[in-house]
Image (spheres, rainbow, N blue to C red):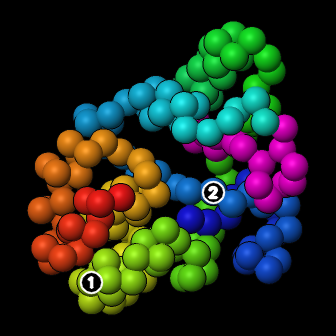
Amino acid sequence: MGYTGGTTEDPTYADIGDHAEAIEIAYDPTEITYEQLILEFWSAHRPDAEPWSTQYRSAVFVHDEEQREVAERTKRMMARKLGRPVHTAVETAAVFTQAEDYHQKYRLRHQPDVFAELVAAYPMVDDLVRSTAAARLNAWVSGWGSQADRQRDLPRTGLSDTAQRSVARR
């Protein structure tokens, strides 16, 4: 979680300026394509919702012309599918500033038993933020992902059996 898309230097939650709250996704293109990621993005939010603030606007931040073409093409596809305008912006990626520690893995923080184990495993916040296991766990406790994915991947997270059961119930 962090801030991007604006001109304010060193944005913070209290002084976000013209930035948007955003996530930064690092991915392996041999595992998933950019287009697959974008299609997941379109299905995971309301692209037809009009932005009610700069901070909470919906946007795709692209890094090159190839990403822009995919984002714009799939945006048009989504508008046709919905039958109404899509208000999600396609913007050029700018500097991404990581949000304050208390914003990281927000949903996991509401699972104290699970979060405590992760903090023990990743005492440095940057390591926790970059952890694939923590990202998956945060998604799962937020209601994303399939039960099959959880059953397959939970044992690989390094969590205790008790914490794994807590996540599996979500």
Quadrant in which the C terminus is drawn: bottom left
State whether residue 104 is above or below residue 81. below
Three-letter code, disc 1: Glu
Q: Which residue is mark 2?
A: 22
Helix, strand or loop for disc 1 = helix
Q: Which residue is mark 1?
A: 117
Magenta-colored span:
50-64
Q: Position of residue 132 (x, y in %)?
A: 30, 61
Q: Position of residue 82 (x, y in %)?
A: 69, 16
Q: Which mark is residue 78?
A: none
Q: Position of residue 6 (x, y in %)?
A: 79, 58
Residue at the image point whose x is 40% and y is 76% from the top: 111
State whether residue 112 is above or below residue 64. below
In terms of image quadrants, where is residue 22? Answer: bottom right
Helix, strand or loop for disc 2 = strand
Residue at the image point whose x is 52% and y is 55% from the top: 24
Q: Is residue 49 left or right of residue 125?
A: right
